[in-house]
Amino acid sequence: MTNQTALFSRLTSILADESRTPLYKRFATAIKDAVREGMLVHEEILPSEREFSQLLNISRITVRKAMDSLEKEGVVLRSRGYGTQISSQFEYSLKEPKGLSQQAVLRGKKPDTVWINKSKIHCSAEIAEKLGLSIGSDVYLLKRIRYVDEQAVSVEESWVPARYIADADAIGISLYDYFHQQQILPVKSQSRVSARMPDEALQQQIALPANVPVLVIKQLAMDAQGNPLEYSISYCRSDMYVFIAE
Amino acid sequence: MTNQTALFSRLTSILADESRTPLYKRFATAIKDAVREGMLVHEEILPSEREFSQLLNISRITVRKAMDSLEKEGVVLRSRGYGTQISSQFEYSLKEPKGLSQQAVLRGKKPDTVWINKSKIHCSAEIAEKLGLSIGSDVYLLKRIRYVDEQAVSVEESWVPARYIADADAIGISLYDYFHQQQILPVKSQSRVSARMPDEALQQQIALPANVPVLVIKQLAMDAQGNPLEYSISYCRSDMYVFIAE
């Protein structure tokens, strides 16, 4: 959906501004802003160094330095013969619940998951209703932060009826691996996807850049017999995630 | 997910602020902010007038005036015996492509659709790839703004291979009704859902409140034989829409 004219007019005005920030940094920031605002979309091929240089009247060295820094930050991918491309987002797909780690590794990045809560609580009215329990029943609240290259990319909260978890300490990186070990096969039944700006509590955990909303993905997973197994709410950086339904 | 304590502490500090804005207006604004930030969630039941009045040490008349104004704006629903509830969002469901108008009517609201573009163009590389066409092939670009009670709630752009549209003027409110008249039955094949803050162009069309992101829903629809029929990008107010996948 790129409007090349709009992009170049934006870049021209940013580069013309008097500023003590080096030109290549302002150029790189402008590209990042254009991605965040949707003026440049994920997987889009950028104009070549030569085109940028000619159209913006800046040196090719400046363009190259900007692209170097954008590549280091993971904003663009460069490949010989194919040009420079805006990085694609991680896909939150209904088909592959374990996708993030695999996707990160495929891109040469290091995924990590840190549990910040695994506790047995009495469930609220809302969770009781989702899981088909009486209010106050025992459930496990499981909360983790997922990282890629040490940057927080999502926060996930799950509520699981206590009877499905014999030993919370035995849950490793993947809750689903734990379920599989017990011969429980969760199936996602419905996903509700919305978006909002992060509140303060989330901002403290995930430290989003200004102006980046979170995708809020609420899901109920059931076992093969239709018994509710897990209700989860994931908060995902919208500049790094796209939700896929097929 | 409401943290009642956090909500009340927020409300207390807002109401304690010295300000010339009437108390009930500040109270109403604080409730709207809490919804936008996810502190109050859609369909949640609010504390009663009496509870708000006692806990915040304000008069029940102030609470009632705030709720009256929130009800007029469609932020809350009130029903006898059931209490005051945060309005639910419109659902963008894969199962019901015509859902918005019906949902609006069910709530006593007036839906409307305004076409702002119906033109035959040569398709870009990106659209060509999505629709399986050669670059520059004839496609219809169809763009409409959807309104509920005269407030813009979404902007939808569609690209359709020209051979499926004999007469663009014959397309009424629903593109799918037009397809059905030609015995074409579109099936959505994949949806990609992301979020971002609106850019200037979108902001001009949809006039979002500050701090409200848009859900960006990209979909490909095919006919029963698997031929691409329509590629669409919908930009939906995230405070009014939730995307549902089942």
Image (tube, coloured by chain):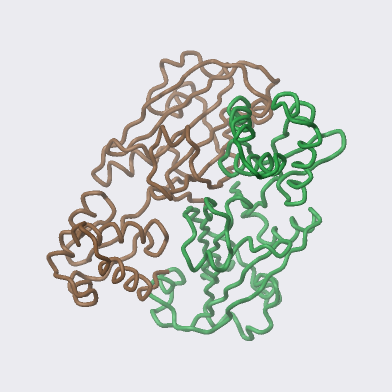
Chain colours: A brown, B green
- State whether residue B95 is above or below residue B13: below
In the displayed structure image, the side of residue A43 where residue A144 appears, left or right: right
In the displayed structure image, the side of residue B28 where residue B109 appears, left or right: right
Name the quadrant containing residue B10.
top right
Q: Name which residue lies at 47% across and 19% down.
A: A118
Q: Name which residue lies at 67% across and 48% down.
A: B89
Q: Residue furthest right?
A: B80
In the displayed structure image, the side of residue B61 where residue B87 appears, left or right: left
Instruction: Pinpoint residue A228: horizontal percent, then vertical percent.
Output: 62, 29
Q: Residue furthest left?
A: A61
Instruction: Pinpoint residue A235: horizontal percent, then vertical percent.
Output: 48, 39
In the displayed structure image, the side of residue A66 where residue A87 appears, left or right: right
Q: Name which residue lies at 67% across and 52% down.
A: B90
Q: Nearer the viewer, residue B84 or B62?
A: B62
Q: Name which residue lies at 77% across and 44% down.
A: B77
Q: Nearer the viewer, residue B106 or A174?
A: B106
Number of numbered discs on residues: 0
Instruction: Pinpoint residue A61: horizontal percent, then vertical percent.
Output: 12, 65
- State whether residue B238 is above or below residue A9: above
Name the quadrant containing residue B33.
top right
- State whether residue A200 is above or below residue A140: below
Instruction: Pinpoint residue B86: horizontal percent, then vertical percent.
Output: 70, 41
Question: On the rendered image, what quadrant is the N terminus of chain B found in?
Answer: top right
Q: Nearer the viewer, residue A152 or A245?
A: A152
Q: Nearer the viewer, residue B9 or B127?
A: B9
